[in-house]
Amino acid sequence: MNRLPDGILVAWYGDDFTGAAAVMEVLSFSGVNTMLFLDPPTRQQLENYPDIQAVGVASTARAQSPEWMRENLPTAFCALLALKPQLFHYKICSTLDSSPDFGSIGCAIEVGADLTGAKTVPILVAAPQMGRIQKDGELFAEFKGKMYLLDQHPVMSCHPITPMTDANVARHIALQSSRIAPAEGADLSITAIDCVTQDDESAAGAKLWGDRVSSSFVVGSQGVEYALVRHWVDSNLVESQPSPPGIGRAKGMVTVSGSVSPVTADQIAWARDNGFTTMRFDVSKACKDDSSLNAEIERLVASGIAALGAGKDPLIFTAEGPNDPAVAELEALGRVEGVSMEKVNARLGDALGQVLDRVLAHSGATRAIVAGGDTSGHATARLGIFALSALAPTIPGAALFRAHADGPRDGLELALKGGQMGSPDYFGWIRYGGGQR
C-alpha cells in the first residue's frame, strides 16, 4: 500500500454550512481524519487535534454580496492556505446556487486565484453518488428519480433567489466575473470537468491530485472529495472503508427548519404523520420590532419544551415549500415595512437558532437537526459550536455529526440538512441514529 503525504491533504472553505459539512462527511467516512470549523481554527484548537488530515471552514458566503466576499474571503482563505494543504478547495453547491449579486462563484475564484497565483482554475461540480452529473459541459441534477438539465430542474429553475437559467457550468460562472474568459481582457480561465460515471470520477480525482503542485486551487462541490477518494482508493493510497453504523435512537430531538424547498416540505409532512409535533414559526414577526420577534421565540421555546416533556420530538418550521402562502406574504410584508429579505432571513435564522439553543438547554435533548443551508449558518452560531466531526451517514450530504463547543453544546449530535437534500423520512432517519440502509 502506498501512502498519502503527511500534513493537511485538503483544506476547504464552504460557501454554506450544509455543503461544508458534506465535504467533511465524504472525507471522514473514507478514513481521512477530518474536522469542520465554523471559523478559521486557532493554533490552540489545531494543537488539540494533532492528527487532522483535512480542515474545513463553513460560512454563509452563498448568501452574501461580492462586496462582503471581497472583504471577508481573503482573511479566511489565507488562514487555510497557511496550513499548507496539498489542495485548497472553495466548496460550492452541487446545483450551482449563485449569481453575480449573491454568492458569486466568479468573485470567489478571483480571490482564490489572486492568493494562489492560479491562472486556470478547475471546476468539478458533478457528484454521481448524489445524482449530479456533468456531460458536455452541462450540469444535470436528479429530482425524484429523474435527471434534469439544471435550467429545467423543477426546483433549481425556479429557485427564489438564484434561479438557474443556463445549465452550462463554465458559462454560468463566467458571467459572474469580468476577469474570467471569455470576458474582454480576461486574465483568468476556468475548466469545468465532465463527470458521469465512477471511472470519470476516478479520472477527475487523478487529474486534480496529479496537478496539485502546479494547480492547488480548485472550485467545486463535494464531488471534488468524492473524486479524490475514488482516485486514492483506486491507487491504493487509502483502503476502501465499510459504511459506519448508526448510533441509535435519540432520547429527545429538536428540529428547526428555515428551508422553503419542496423536498423539506415533504419531510415536514412525513414528520407530522409519524409522531413529531410540528410548529409553525410566524415569519411575519421577523419584519416587526424586536419585542414581537422575541415574543414568538418565547412561544416556540415553551411549546418545544412541552412537546419533549410529553415524549414528542418538536419540529419548528417557517414554511412548507415555495408555494406556502407564508412565503409570498413575508415578501409583501417586507416591502411594506421597508425591510430587505436579506435582513429578514438573517433574523429568522438567528431566531431559529435561539429557539433551538433554549429548548436544548431546558429539556436535556441530545440531538438536533437544522434544515436549510443558510439557516444552518445562523443557527449553529447561536449554539456556541466551533467545530463538527462525523458520527453516522445517511444519504450523501446530510450526515449526523458531533458538535465541538466550549460550552454546554459540546457533544451535541447534530444534523445539518440542505433544502434539496434527504428522503421523505429523513427526520425520522436522524431520530433513529442514521446509518446506511
Image (cartoon, rainbow, N blue to C red):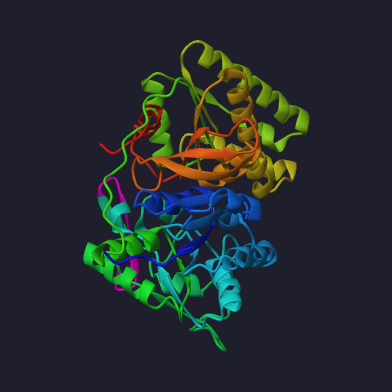
State the image coordinates of residue 28 (x, y, percent, origin top left). 40, 50
Front residue (pair 52, 272): 52
* Farthest-out residue, top: 310
State the image coordinates of residue 410 (x, y, percent, origin top left). 58, 34
Q: Main secondary structure of the magenta part?
A: strand
State the image coordinates of residue 154 (x, y, percent, origin top left). 37, 50
**Residue 347 can be seen, yes or no:** yes
Count of labels shown? 0
User: Seen in the image, is 126 located left or right of residue 219?
Assistant: left
Front residue (pair 270, 87): 87
For image coordinates 41% across by 58% down, the residue present is 222
Quarter placement of the N terminus: bottom left
For image coordinates 49% across by 48% down, the residue present is 18
User: Seen in the image, is 269 located left or right of residue 1?
Assistant: right
Residue 137 lies in magenta, yes or no? Answer: yes
Note whether 51 is above or below 306 in the view shown.
Answer: below
Note whether 96 is above or below 215 in the view shown.
Answer: above
Residue 212: quarter of image: bottom left
Quarter placement of the C terminus: top left
Front residue (pair 109, 347): 109
Residue 27 lies in magenta, yes or no? Answer: no
State the image coordinates of residue 386 (x, y, percent, origin top left). 61, 44
* Farthest-out residue, bottom: 185
Q: Give the residues drawn in magenta, as a range.
A: 134-145
Note whether 303 is above or below 357 in the view shown.
Answer: above
**Residue 197 can be seen, yes or no:** no
